[in-house]
Amino acid sequence: MASQATAIYDKSLEKTLQLFPLAPDTVKILESLPSARGRDVTDFGSPAPVPIDVYREKVPSEVLEITEKDPYLLLQDLKAGKISAVKVLTAYFHAAIFASKLVNCVYEFLPEEALELAKGLDSEKNFLLPLFGLPVSIKEMIPFKGRSVTHGSLCYLDRVVDYNADIVNIVISNGAIPFVRTTNPQSLMMLECESFTHGRTVNPYNSLLTSGGSSGGEGAINGIGASALGFGSDIGGSIRCPSSFNGIYGMRTTVGRLPTADYFSCQMGSESILSVTGPMTRSLKLLNLVMDVILTARPWLVDPTLASIDWKPTTTKKLKIGILNYDGVVMPQPPIKRALDIVRLRLLSIDNVEVIEFKPYDHAKAWEIISTLYFEDGGVDTKRTLESTGEPLCPQTAWVVEGRNVKPLAMHEQWHWNLEKQKYRKAYLAHWVKSGLPDAVIAPVFPGPPAKHRTAKYWGYTSQWNLLDYPALVFPVTKVDVELDKPVEYEPTNEMDEFIYKEYDSAELFSNAPVNLCAVGLRNTEEKLVEVVKLLI
């Protein structure tokens, strides 16, 4: 069945090259590139050490002139009629073809649908559409009409849907052009991007490191610059870690803010811990715009799970911003500590900002609660899904599904843990208020920079906010510096702390890797987070 999955990719690539042909010389260059796609889905190829360097050197200059432009500024050119939607789409398809070979980020190209949309936009010239002609990438688990939705599991290759997800319809109706579907891992429950449907997606800045998960393809294609805007999902860090690991902006929204009710995943029907959707992009201005566009469409009139809250950008005369240096469970690695210092100094230099230290409140308890509630059935649904075709568990899937807190919960046990969740949420809110009621808290997204493959095993810096249902906006700060970020001596306090400590054994192994942080706020304060992050760029 894995060959059926790769055939989907191969056929879509062939059709893309027919409709958007490359020059003969460019084809030769493409064929000579080191590949992150191997002979099959268990062969991870021989990717370049720094794929983004190869990408920027080998992609034709006339393509990069379009794709390397800030996506928000490119959108202004499209809306002013300075460049056609077809020309922009062609450039992004060519960029995505290169990116896919270098980092294996594309599950499937959408050439026919995208070309039809682009031609229609150029013909009608309705420049009032807020996303006119903007190429958009979509995570594979988000339904797209006429395409199978597997969320990384081979048994769903024949599940072809007859509708677009609500969020896809909204962005299309506002002028955006979905042009690729991006890779996501087996079961979606990992901060890695590996499955038997596509193989492994690698980090554009250092192929020894992961692109993150589960929106790993979105992180990689936006990070390398071959998409203007993408959409992922997040139940434990699946937007934030890929955004962080690939040096882009990404937002974990509050439950009920953006439509997700028609997405696919394992454990469908479980509502103890809910997944959310959010934008991922190189441009904060574009992220802000697309949030406005989606909410202006009043998606709560289509998706009954949503709250009717408009997008209302804020400007506050004085901001109080907390800094979370350490969650009390796993100590951040040197690059993250340095990034926190950079942001702290930046905030201290701004007149209308008060900076406070924000201390954690029993984050270990949060992981106990959420890791128990992730798999109320003890992981039976996930395992049964794979067993139906004899598909083995990927190492990272096995790690989370067979975790120490994963066990089947009887009804009264589910009630107990949901009550624990609500108690913890109330206690944490009181802690937030007692800490000075900050407008936002700057925190790590992960204990370190992008992790080595199959080692991203600490979710606490992201799942914490899923349990509380607090929005978080990821933003780039710096990159790993081999001189400034050398490993330091430290006495770990627990088993996971020791594991993370030992993984950062050499700054050179993480060289060139992005270092991001996130701004976290109380529920439904996404606009405030944008305001805060604007101060830092």
Image (cartoon, rainbow, N blue to C red):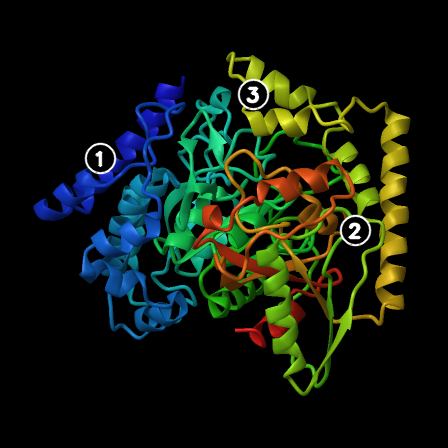
Contact? badges 3 and 1 (CB < 8 Å): no
Q: Amino acid at mark 1?
A: Glu
Single out the mark in the foreground, 1 or 2: 2
The answer to whether residue 258 is seen in the rendering is yes
Label drawn at residue 151: none
Query: Label 3, label 1: how many angstroms apart (C-alpha)?
Result: 31 Å
Q: Which element carries disc 3, helix, strand or loop? A: loop
Residue 509: percent from the left, percent from the top? 47, 46
Which of the two labelled residues, at mark 2 and mark 3, occupies the earlier sequence position? 2
Q: Is residue 65 left or right of residue 441?
A: left
Label drawn at residue 393: 3
Q: Is residue 457 left or right of residue 287?
A: right
Q: Amino acid at mark 3?
A: Leu
Q: Is residue 398 left or right of residue 524?
A: left
Residue under numbered circle 2: 328
Query: Going 66% across and 22% down the picture, which residue do you hit?
Result: 381
Single out the mark in the foreground, 3 or 1: 3
Which of the two labelled residues, at mark 1 and mark 2, occupies the earlier sequence position? 1
Residue 205: percent from the left, percent from the top? 40, 51
Above or below: residue 207 compared with residue 532: above
Query: Label 2, label 3: how many angstroms apart (C-alpha)?
Result: 31 Å
Query: Going 74% across and 46% down the picture, which residue do you hit?
Result: 491
Label drawn at residue 14: 1
Which image quarter: residue 406? top right
Which of the two labelled residues, at mark 3 and mark 1, occupies the earlier sequence position? 1
Q: Which element carries disc 2, helix, strand or loop? A: loop
Contact? badges 1 and 2 (CB < 8 Å): no
Residue 524: percent from the left, percent from the top? 71, 62
Q: Residues within 10 Å of mark 2 (few under 14, many from 20)?
A: some
The answer to whether residue 235 is seen in the rendering is no
Q: Amino acid at mark 2?
A: Gly
Above or below: residue 471 compared with residue 314: above
